[in-house]
Image (spheres, rainbow, N blue to C red):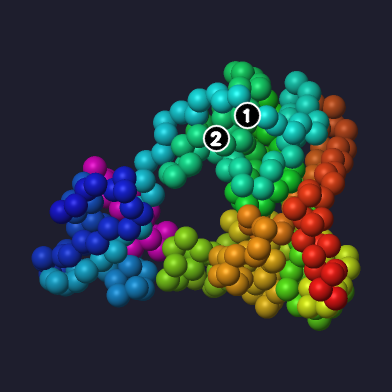
Amino acid sequence: MNTDMETTHKRTYICEKDGERLDVFLSAAIGNCTRSAAQKLIEAGCVTLLGVPVKKNHRTTAGEEFEAFIEPPSPAEAAPQDIPLEIVYEDSDVIVVNKPQGMVVHPAPGHPDGTLVNALLAHCGESLSGVGGKKRPGIVHRIDKDTSGLIIAAKNDRAHLALSAQLSARTLTREYDAIVRGAMKNRQGTIDAPIGRHPVDRKRQAVTEKNSRPAVTHYEVVEEYAGYSHLRCRLETGRTHQIRVHLAHLGHPILGDTIYGSKKREPGLAGQCLHARKLKFIHPTTGELMEIESDLPAYFKKHKGTVLLCC
């Protein structure tokens, strides 16, 4: 039995008994793992046999080799770090920051510090909501590490709960700009396709009917170039990597996206050409409709210009 899970996300366990409940076997094999935690891993599709997620009613056969994908423990509490922030709006309830490409939102395995949360703790002190816990104080929603743009954080629990309710009700609007490969068939449209974990690569998401959740993205074409399109996308739901997965599913991966598009990195581009340009929400105290926009960052303008030159 191998219980050292801090160095990898994937561990292999070989069963020696016939007819044992899978959750019972895993809780004993993994170590420091309750049956409830093992059941959650199975239900999330994080336990596979021959590369296929195992059903929760599976009974073991001696010699079966299971792979379990387990997140290593992350830091118990984030620490303040004096990291520059581009603050677009701030009051006693909320703070809106223009996150640069390459910055992680909150501490996680592989990124224990240097995150937006570390910077917010240094700037706001203890005036961040505790709804998200000690690892994610103030964080209402997230954007990917290599996506730039606007993100809102709450400075008290009341504001956090109000903004979370708007997210659930789909009244907190998030718009993104993206440069994608190819010409779109339609000038505007809606992608309504459920998203869940990729059946083989657990670090990716995919359009799938299995263990998935509804996902809706609206898009319109801003400009077209030879072999590329500049899109504006609006999220109706907020699944992990949603815009990236949906556009790749249409056959139009985002420029620079090495996970869902070309594996070859785009010269001079640190991540995907995707920018969270606009937030619209109801202020949790005043009830005022807030519309906050961000200019396209330099990297986006540069690669938009490169695309134009290729025309």
- Provide residue 125's location: percent of width, then percent of height: 61, 18
In this view, the residue farthest toward the top is: 126
The answer to which quarter of the image holds residue 57 is bottom left
Q: What crowding class fits label 2: few (fewer than 14 Cα within 10 Å), some (14-19), or many (20 or more)? A: some
Tell me the residue at 75%/53% (across/down).
299
Residue 39 on the magenta span? yes
Q: Amino acid at mark 1?
A: Ile
- In-front residue for pair 142/115: 115
Instruction: Give the residues drawn in magenta, as a range.
Output: 32-47
Please give left or right for residue 258 compared with residue 224 in the image: left
- In-front residue for pair 129/248: 248
Please give left or right for residue 246 compared with residue 304 in the image: left
* Distance from the alpha carbon under mark 1 to that under mark 2: 7 Å
Residue 82 on the magenta span? no
Q: Is residue 27 above or below residue 132?
A: below
- In-front residue for pair 108/50: 108
- Provide residue 95's location: percent of width, then percent of height: 73, 30
| Residue indicated by mark 1 | 83
| Residue indicated by mark 2 | 114
Q: Is residue 285 above or below residue 9?
A: above
Q: Are marks 1 and 2 in contact (CB under 8 Å)?
A: yes
- Provide residue 35's location: percent of width, then percent of height: 27, 50
Residue 188 visible here = no
Q: Amino acid at mark 2?
A: Gly
Please give left or right for residue 130 compared with residue 218 in the image: left
The total of numbered circles placed on residues is 2
Q: What crowding class fits label 1: few (fewer than 14 Cα within 10 Å), some (14-19), or many (20 or more)? A: some
Tell me the residue at 61%/47% (across/down).
102
Of marks 1 and 2, which one's residue comes earlier in the chain?
1
Tell me the residue at 77%/61% (across/down).
303
